[in-house]
């Protein structure tokens, strides 16, 4: 399936996909053609494993991940 960015049907089709987190401690936000994965500092699954899972899901669904637009942001509490 190919979803055109900013298309009217994109959000409906994308939201129906079967992408889920590997850990119940994480949260996955999906909208249109964007996905955000929130990973807690202490998780039972490594960040690399989670990203590999997302990449495999994308390959299985013929979706291209734009690595240049993929970012990792680390939030932490001030000491």
Image (cartoon, rainbow, N blue to C red):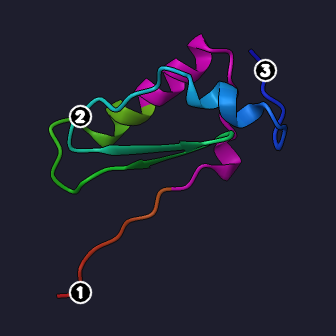
- Residue 6 quadrant: top right
The percent coordinates of residue 70 (x first, y second) are 60, 49
Q: Earlier in the sequence, mark 1 or mark 2?
A: 2
User: In this figure, which residue is indicated by the disc labeled 3?
Assistant: 2
Q: Nearer the viewer, mark 1 or mark 2?
A: 2
Which region of the structure is painted magenta? 52-71
Q: Is residue 49 left or right of residue 25?
A: right
In what element is the residue under mark 3?
loop
Question: Within 10 Å of the Cα at label 1, are there few (<14), some (14-19), or many (20+) other Cα atoms?
Answer: few
Q: CA distance from mark 1 to mark 2?
A: 26 Å
The percent coordinates of residue 10 (x first, y second) are 75, 33
Magenta segment, principal secondary structure? helix
Q: Nearer the viewer, mark 3 or mark 1?
A: 3
Which disc is residue 78 wearing?
A: 1
Q: Is residue 64 left or right of residue 78?
A: right
Q: Assess whether residue 65 is covered by the magenta stretch.
A: yes
User: In this figure, which residue is indicated by the disc labeled 2?
Assistant: 23
- Reply above or below: 59 against 24: above
Question: Within 10 Å of the Cα at label 3, are there few (<14), some (14-19), or many (20+) other Cα atoms?
Answer: few
What residue is rendered at 23% in x and 80% in y? 77
- Residue 33 quadrant: top right
Mark 1 touching mark 2, by CB under 8 A? no
Quarter of the picture holding the C terminus = bottom left
Viewer-nearest residue: 60 or 52: 60
């Amino acid at each position: 399936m190919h979803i055109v960015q900013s298309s009217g049907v994109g959000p409906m089709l994308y939201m129906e996909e079967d992408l889920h987190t590997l850990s119940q401690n994480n949260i996955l936000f999906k909208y249109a053609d964007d996905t955000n994965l929130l990973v807690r500092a202490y998780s039972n699954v490594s960040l690399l494993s989670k990203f590999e899972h997302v990449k495999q899901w994308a390959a299985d669904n013929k979706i291209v991940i734009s690595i240049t637009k993929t970012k990792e942001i680390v939030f932490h509490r001030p000491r």
